[in-house]
Amino acid sequence: MSFRSGLLWKVKSSNKPASYLFGTIHLQTPIFSDHQLLITEKINSCNFFGAEVDLDQMESSDLQQYFKLPQYGNWSTSLRPAQWIKMQKLSQERFGIDLNHFTSMYPMIGLNQLSLQLIGRAQEKSLDQQLWELAKESNRQMVGLEDFDAHFNMIRSIELKDQIKMIRELFKNLEQSKRKYKKMITDYNNQDLQAIYQSSRKMLGKYRQVMLNQRNQFMLVKMIELMKIDTGFFSCGAGHLYGLEGLLRLLKKAGFVLQPVKL
């Protein structure tokens, strides 16, 4: 079976009722509004609802403890003064954002906010949030598939110089960056898992092992643990589904039968 396309998958084992795996995007998408009835039906057919992390815990936690650079660091001092002035000017002119607000945090925090601003999606409620709220309203048992601390501490596994390089590349060619992010959204709405994975893999570079493959293993273990107890509707970024070490192949190797659900 090809795993190249399809966001929603039925996951079956022996004679047990079906669980589901849904690849998400950390934005709003018409996929949700166009197929809300079907998605709701599948969520309600399961006991557990699992997201990458527990979003209620995220809401009640002080995330600054994960985002702040150690020892009162400031990554702007790693740039030449002329580079910093140019980036700060572009940020103010294009986004109305003062980069000084982000310099004491890991650069990827600022990069994420600037990327959302670049494509005009900063104020939206993400698909992950919409699914979480829908499942809570249906009184599902809510769980995070990854350890909360491990998930947010992952940012520290990416070297500071590489995070700075990422944010510099955004400013180097804003229109090219915008086209790249727009393509990822189009690929998602087309349910093209292969294209989504390839974009994620390229973007993560040498960090794909820790940011994709390692996390897939953690989520796989949790999903299997929960499915031994009862059925689950599991959601995670669509980039985690495809690939030799993607969740779809890992579930198949673990003995589960997978079938795409048409959206």
Image (spheres, rainbow, N blue to C red):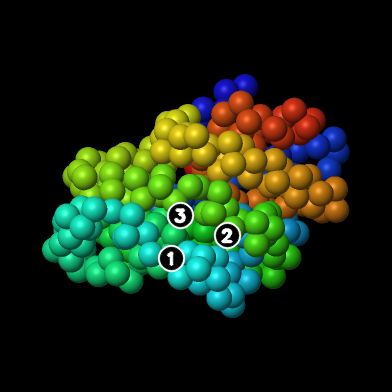
Question: Residue at the location (85% across, 53% down)?
Answer: 229
Instruction: Check disc 3: other Cα within 10 Å, few if <14, some if 14-19, many if 20+.
Output: some
Residue 83 pos. (x, y %): 20, 53
Q: Which numbered disc, 2 or 1, marks the residue that appears first in the sequence? A: 1
Q: CA distance from mark 3 to mark 1?
A: 28 Å
- Tell me the tag on residue 26: 3
Q: Which residue is mark 1?
A: 73
Can you tell which quarter of the image residue 110 is in?
bottom left
Observer-nearest residue: 59 or 78?
Answer: 78
Question: Residue at the location (21% across, 57% down)?
Answer: 81
Residue 170 pos. (x, y %): 27, 48
**In this orientation, does residue 200 appear?**
no
Above or below residue 204? Residue 106 is: below
Give the SS element for disc 3: loop
Can you tell which quarter of the image residue 247 is in?
top right
Numbered disc total: 3
Residue 50 pos. (x, y %): 67, 56
- Tell me the tag on residue 152: 2
Observer-nearest residue: 133 or 209?
Answer: 209
Q: Which numbered disc, 3 or 2, marks the residue that appears first in the sequence? A: 3
Can you tell which quarter of the image residue 142 is in?
bottom right
Instruction: Check disc 2: other Cα within 10 Å, few if <14, some if 14-19, many if 20+.
Output: some
Question: Residue at the location (40% across, 68% down)?
Answer: 104
